[in-house]
Image: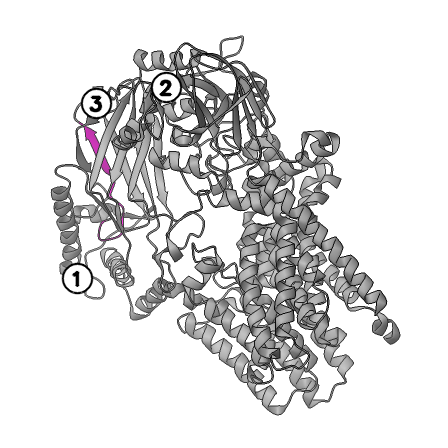
Amino acid sequence: MNKVIKKCPAWLFYSLIFFVITMAYVWTFYLTGNSLIWGMDGIAQHYPILINFKHMLSEFLAHPSHGFTNWSFNIGLGADQLTSFSYYVVGDFFNYLIVLFPDHLLELGYGLLVILRLYVAGLAFLLFAHQFNFKKISLVLGTLTYTFAGYSLYAGMHHPFFILPMIFFPLICYGVERIIRNHSMLPLMLAVALTFLSNFYFAYIIGLGSIIYVIIRYLSIRKDPDFHFVKSVVKMGAAILSGILISAVIFVPTLLFAMKSTRITSNFANGYLFYPLYYYLSIPSKILGNGYLTISFWLIISISGLSFLGIVYTLSHFKKYRYLNYGLIVVFIGALIPAFGAVFNAISTPSNRWVCLGLLPIGLAATIFAEHISTLSKRDLEIMIGATIGLIIIIWASRGFIMKLSAHDYGEIILLLVLVGIILCSQLFHWNQRLTMGSVTGLLVVNLISLGVGYYSPNVSGFSKGMLNKQVATNFVNNFYNGANKYVEPRLKGERTALGNRYHYAGRNDVNLSNYSNINTNIPMLFGTHDISSYLTVENGAIGQLESSVQNNQRTFNAPVAQNDYRTTLDNLMGVKYLFIRNGQQDKSQPFGFKTVKGKDRKPLLFTANNPLVDDKEPDGTLVLQNKNALPLVYTQEQTVSDKQYQALSPTEREQSMISGAHVTKPVRGIPAAKLNDKQKQLDYEVKPDYEKTLDNFDKLTTFTNNSKRVEYSEPSINHTSPDTAQKILDENVELETETQKQNADGLHVMTKDVLGKPIPYFLKLKQPNRTKNAELYLQLDGIKSHDYTTDAKNAMVERQHAIKNEPYTRMMKLNQMRKNLHTPFINQYSFNAATKGMKNGYSQYGRDNLSNYAQKKNVLINLGYSPKRRGQIKLTFDGVSRLNFKHARLIAVPFGNSYEQRIHKLQRNRLQKLRVKRDEVKGISTNPKKSVLTTSIPYSPGWKLTVDGKPAPTQRVNTGFVGAILPAGKHQIRLRYQTPGLILGSVASIIGILILIISSIVIWIFKKRK
């Protein structure tokens, strides 16, 4: 047996233990009935994109001449498959294995690919660490701690491709080591190529991490006589350049697209100089466990006890492991500074995803500790015990001097204590190395299983609730529209579809459905419905600018179009012919011109295929609305709106102006400027706050309701609240009411919670409600300022709540409240809702800790829907902060009627005749007796090339976000052809890089053979 173990290679030993640990995870998912698909971005982004990618692979294998990636009108308004999917699937070679799985096993394939990436991450670290001549058992233990750290266990199950840097960073470091040890540059060249092919974002992160690694390694070996600085630098430069050249076929087009995407922002580090206090207080309890079960600023630690002791060991032997410790110190300091995370996150938000690179020095520290675990000195043991006790004390202090932890985190601390106990026993009782390492290995396996189970067992973690049950994702995707898509798809001829208000808004309590809302899902791309929305990390910047200019309330960096906030003209401009709504919503406000599709029995056509994620309380089924005013994909405009005209308009006026004329950057000779007739109405209103539930007199105390529980109020007693104290609180509310009424006398300027923290509803009463008939109603808020609670203000509010309920508020209760407030993020995050007859809408202000979509909303335009009937009032509510201030709050009515439809129908008549839409091509015949602007709703890209009657013609941006051109009068053959920008350049560069790789390999082979 001993001989077998000795002959067993490290990778096989690692593989066996990896299998044991992952089987424990699989068993946990089996018991819970969960899949490995996350209920947010997993189902909204990763799973549908992987399914789409599988279809792309199958199509390419069946018809190679069609090409692998093309322009697809199934990705929102239309997008390049290569540049849109390069962040997710195209360069991730693991995803190509999905073609082996039949459609009914795609969920299984998704999960197996997650596990495969995790396994290969360990192999990559094993390859890297093997160069340092560790013992086999030490190497395996260090590899396991690297593979099953908290980052991989969380990120891998939520964003599978986030495991990729754990694969490529060790490979690049391995390549660097080969060069500085005077070996071949080929490993580095291949590692760089794979990195830049896989994901440009992680290539950037890994690139910065590699620079730090190279600097530290240079400092450590600069005096080594075998190290040749100039030679190493030249070889590294050649390897890196060649690797980038090999990857250029994907990297160059993606980089060109990303540089003009919605992601370009100047809000560095979300404005943070230092992180909020709660972030720093959360770090100690995250070292071993899950902390507060929140992933603030993407800081995920959750390392094993062996890793923790490894860090302690290397730091305590600082001179011996000086340069490894430099790396650890960089990780420690970097995690404390927002600017560090922002730099690693492409000079944007302060995300700590880069911490995955820190797992490499932590893994090395664990390996070194395992190497010396049988030969620890008395000093080592004392430091180890002291560090363990010190960590527990720091956790206790950071939690407010109470050990209020989850059962799982207690378990992780116990496992650390057991590990320390095993090491002490091995020293005291002189265990042989086999017993010591066997005990440590067994405990490490338990520790790593516990880490994973701690994330995904419902007994110890809330993360389990976020994972979808098996087959739920498949059924949800298949029945996303309840089967209504089968009616719509064959009837589309270049037009598009959208989702109605709150189509997938509500859901079961056991699944977080925030990303199933209309604005955040890629599921429609799997059908032929041509939904206008897409939810991608990198989106078309021109479309983002359009949506920003008209103040689309739903616009985010990840979903610039969303569902256009259900605005009539935006939908018409984008050719929305059909709208999917839930059964029971047909009587709600819908965009002008949309009518319910009816069957032969003249009843609404209802589609009822089962959807597993629709709330049982919701009316089942989908209805389809058809729009008679949808504009064609391509048409001609006979008038223009100059950029000067456009910029002088309000957001709603800009939207309407694009029906009158094509928005162009400058006037066009021979095409008249549109005469814009402003028919919009600004409506007068008065603000009426609802103080019914605001405690402002003693009579209301007897009916005071808090958290839906009736609280009987007795006469104040000396032991609790005095009458004077209660009266003071009531007077504060009266004073608040008086002050807000004064501020809102000439329009809405402030909304506030009362002094007890209860939001006050506000009603905007229209003075002339008849003016809202046959119009789309908007609430425009300008100069928004939010005011969050401070810790002191929150403490004072809670004290008032106890006082007004005549409850004691002891010093212990005050202390506990202070602890709670210190660990609560006050980040100006709130939601705002506006409701009127037939429509409820609003917006969410993401907090400053949001790393994907944070942008301070200073101006908001909320669509309150179209109605042929009058609307008399709008109810406003908010939650999350203490007060909102507005510089201006306007109600705007945008009328719709015959005049509007006449303009629409004229544009419809100017459509391209004999329109044909194919892969990468749109063509047809334009017939217009006047010089005109070719206007499309195709997202602008320089990749679109135009020919008119077979001759090249220049394109330009029209309506801010779309492809257009100037056409001479007459009848013309129009052909738009798309080619990915940078693809030819990237392909040539890749060919050169591959030739360099081949020639280098041959030269090295010949050199070795002669040697």
CA gap, disc 3 and disc 2: 19 Å
| Residue drawn at the location 64% of the way across and 62% of the way down | 172
Of tags 1 and 3, which is closer to the observer? 3
- The part of the image, by quadrant, that contains residue 595 is top left
Determine which of the numbered discs, if any, sits on residue 592 in the image. 2
Left or right position of 799 against 175 = left
Q: Which residue is mark 3?
A: 769
Is 3 above or below relative to 631? below
Of tags 3 and 2, which is closer to the observer? 2
Is 427 above or below relative to 920? below
Q: Earlier in the sequence, mark 3 or mark 2?
A: 2
CA gap, disc 1 and disc 3: 48 Å
Which quadrant holds the N terminus? bottom right
Residue type, mark 1 in image: Ser
Q: Nearer the viewer, residue 132 or 956?
A: 956
Q: Which residues are magenta?
A: 754-766
Is 180 above or below relative to 239? below
- Position in image of residue 77 (x %, y %): 49, 30
Please rate how many residues cluster around mark 3, counting C-alpha atoms within 10 Å: few if below 14, some from 14 to 19, many from 20: some
